[in-house]
Image: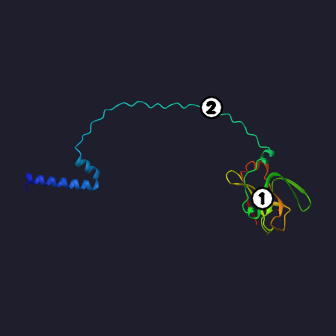
Amino acid sequence: MKITTEKASVIIAVVTLIVTVVLAVYYPQVTQIFIQSPIITPTPTPITTSTPIITPTPIITPTPIITPTTTPKPTDVINQLPPIEWGIMETYFDISDTTLGEAEYTDVLGMVYEYDSINFIVEAKRSFYAIIIFEAEFYDEDGIKVYSSFVDFDPDYDQWQPGDRSKGHMELPSTSDMGKVRSIKISQFA
């Protein structure tokens, strides 16, 4: 079989067309560059020597001298009353005159105990039986409970009537724990 120039031109044109279609389907970016752009021959880039990278020497700053902090004295800690969330207690009472101080507890044997406390005045808003026990929870800056104590009333009525007034108090944690306390939350224990 003899291939003429005309047949060779047709074969080359068909092969070029097939290659162009295959490239267009699988590599459209290459085909656009191939069809639309003139042929660019890369020019060799001259080889240059690189300059060494110089890293700066770090500047040494002096470390500040830390002075030791003093441990707060009980009077310092007690003079700082953290915020109190009264919660459910405000449903039953109007609460006023919140101060730091001391309270006493007399046990069944007649022994009297004094302790640091948060003292306040309550006035009943409505009538209710005194079967409700309130608990004070003391939290640190991360919201972790440091201490808890019950809220006591003096006098503690069996049944509260609107307008009944009483002194309330809750025991404070130890001086070291009180230094960590950032908030107090009151909840209903029973």
Find residue 90 and report its image quarter.
bottom right
Disc 1 target residue:
95
Mark 2 or mark 1, earlier in chain: 2
Neighbour class for label 2 at 10 Å: few (<14), some, many (≥20)? few
User: For the point 77% across and 47% down, which residue is it?
Assistant: 77
Query: What quarter of the picture does the N terminus occupy?
Result: bottom left
* Numbered-mark total: 2
Eye-nearest disc, 2 or 1? 1
**Which numbered circle lies on residue 2?**
none
Depth check: 162 or 34 in front? 162
Depth check: 4 or 185 in front? 185
Q: Is residue 49 left or right of residue 15?
A: right
Q: Is residue 17 left or right of residue 149?
A: left
Percent position (x, y) of residue 61?
Answer: 60, 32
Disc 2 marks a residue whose amino acid type is Pro
Disc 2 target residue:
62
Percent position (x, y) of residue 177?
Answer: 76, 50
* 161 vs 186: above or below: below
- Report helix, strand or loop for mark 1: strand
Q: Are marks 2 and 1 in contact (CB under 8 Å)?
A: no
Percent position (x, y) of residue 33?
Answer: 26, 47
Query: What quarter of the picture does the C terminus occupy?
Result: bottom right
Disc 1 marks a residue whose amino acid type is Ile
Find residue 159 and report its image quarter.
bottom right
- Report helix, strand or loop for mark 2: loop
Neighbour class for label 1 at 10 Å: few (<14), some, many (≥20)? some
User: For the point 69% across and 36% down, which residue is it?
Assistant: 66
Find residue 188 and report its image quarter.
bottom right
